[in-house]
Amino acid sequence: MPSTTRVPFRAAVHRAVGRSVAPRSATAPRSAAPRSTATRALLALVTGAVALLGVLATAGPAGAHAALTGSDPAKGSVVRGAPEQVTLDFSEGVAMSDGAIRVLDPRGQRVDTRKVRDTGTAGKVQRAVSLKPGLGKGTYTVAWQAVSADSHPVSGAFTFSVGQPSKTSATVPQQDKDAGGGTVGALYGVGRYAAYAGFVLLIGGAAFVLVCSPRAASSRAVQRLTVTGWTTLAASTLALLLLRGPYTGSGRFADVLDLGALQDVVATKPGAALVSRLLLLAAAALFVSVLFGAYARSGGEEAAQEEAARQRRDLRYGLSVGGTVVAAGLAATWAMAEHASTGIQAGVAMPVDVLHLLAVALWLGGLAALFCLLRWGPAPTGTTVRRFSRLAFTCVTVLAATGLYQSWRQVGSWSALTGTSYGQLLMVKVLLVGVLVSVGWFSRRWTTRLTESPAAASASARGTTVPTRRSPEGVTARTSARSAPEAPAGQQAGTTDPVRAAQLARQRAAADAARERQEREADPQRSGLRRSVLTEAAVAVVLLAVTTALTGTEPGRTEEQVRAATDAARNAPGGPVDVKVPFDTGGPDGKGTAELEIDPGSSGDNSLELRTTGPSGKPVEAPEVKVAFTLPAKDLGPLSVPLKPVEREKGHWKATGLQLPMAGKWKVAITVRTSDIDQVTKTTTATIG
């Protein structure tokens, strides 16, 4: 029996499929080549995007996003006496735990009290830690670690000196070096990219079904796409939550399962955002199950009964409202913990960021869903493609408006756009969006040529009709106008084997699907649209990688603020100015060194101390010393300084109220007289800030 039934069926398949496709067989190799080329192009672009993401992820911790704009004592400064505390100024809000500011003496021992205090006033972000009393002279190291308000770890270190600089054996703690970098940093970057990709596929795929093609709810390809988006977003969110502790702390992958660190993470704003995202994903799972369950079984737009159509409309309305709420909530988990939540106009920036993310998801996720239909079916109608084209145009308009606002907010100036890493990445992103829009223009051209039904069009060209029949499984399929192959002898009505009949039905359905797929592949309009959409999707993969990199880069406005603060600190007075001048009056005990200290060493009011010491380091008593200041560049001076000897301190003089009217390189003349006839004047320069 098998040998007698398979041959007629094989022949029937060839007749059903071959006759409709045979006239196009000469061109089949040419249609297969572009698909192979497009697939290779997609793989190349995906590989490039992954490589780009790998480079960005392994580039080390970002110099983002809250930045140190100042400190007291200042970086590299020399202070006269030991300070009571160290204060740090930041460009935006930070979270710092006790012990996050470490102050180490020249021997590497901690001299801070570990208690970090918030000392900011009038909108100024400032943190301070008290120092132990009795600090000696030398160079001290300050190492700090914080989490900026936009969820990224930041750290740094600098030195200051008490009295005078010295050698130091202090080293920056390892956890300050590793936070945000290494293996954990790379995995965290990959997780961020996967979260964005999952969000785009989940929201875009579901929205495509509701807005553009309810018929696509029965497509397994679109269903797999949307479910993959949900799974990717859920898995990446859970991974980010576990990685958050070592990412902002120790930097060690072994601490991923540290429950104590996880508890601390949940108490932070980024941790709360990740937990909220997981809860919203539970609601999204229910939404997806209804969308591809009850809604798909309702028959999309093809239900005939009025009551069924009304129930379907109600279900669609409920899914639209619920889906919008869930999608906006998921987008808000990024807005509340990323760049939008900090900086200027945060109250406006967060809802704008939600709109921006939703527009990206509807556009790029819809592209992926459209490609699934074009590649695996059911073939989208011209109405479906035109609906998506209008949706994409709206999304691009929203992206342009919200992106322009966010760019102004994060960059702020042309110099920051061209001279910072954030600005340069932003220009790359704008370029990719431009490429995407240009390719979309070609897609619109193919859309205008698209026929409503490729099978109907091809059948019309052959002068046949395409009736519709329902298979035993209840699946609607288009068949050829030719009669179905007759069953062989012994398989007529009344004597048909039910098992064999079901097998024949499945084989006929497979033959119909194969014929439809070949007709769809042979349609030049749909083939052109499919290649265009594939190119758009490939560019979108790279665009998401650049967007992920932007979230890990310090905003241009902040970087410029830090540069300005650094330049100001560099040009500001660096503390007391010390000047040492050797002298020799020529008389007995006439050799020595005059050491001059000008405090604070800036324009305006200063105090001055002068000490004279002999070659052995012992103080040298001189009957008279004089100091005069001259600024040759401005033809100022000489300005004499009235020195007074310090009681009971041999070789020590002081002066107060020294007015140096402006900054610059001042010429300092020091006159030392050791006897009635032994006297010498030495000159040097002192830079006054």
Image: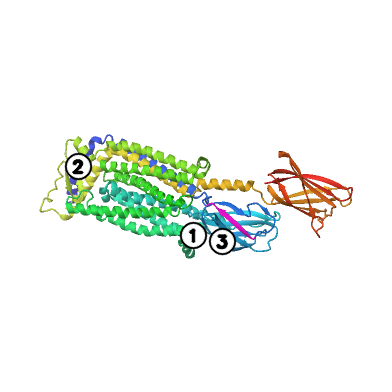
Q: Amino acid at mark 3?
A: Arg
Residue 390 percent coordinates (x, y): 31, 42
Please give the residue where the numbered disc 3 appears in the rendered image: 117
Q: Amino acid at mark 1?
A: Gly
Please indicate, yes or no, whether residue 21 appears anywhere in the rendered image: yes
Colour scheme in the image? rainbow
Please identify the dominant SS of the magenta region.
strand
Please give the residue where the numbered disc 1 appears in the rendered image: 245
Instruction: Examine the rendered structure and indicate whether residue 23 appears above or below residue 608.
Output: above
Residue 347 percent coordinates (x, y): 43, 52
Q: Amino acid at mark 2?
A: Ala
121 relative position to 442: left or right? right
User: Callout 1: helix, strand or loop?
Assistant: helix
Front of the two marks 2 and 3: 3
Q: Which residues are magenta?
A: 84-91
Q: Which mark is residue 16?
A: 2
> Is 202 included in the stretch rendered in magenta?
no
Mark 1 to mark 2: distance in Å?
A: 62 Å
> Is 90 included in the stretch rendered in magenta?
yes
Residue 653 percent coordinates (x, y): 79, 54
Q: Residue at x 42, y 50 (%)?
A: 348
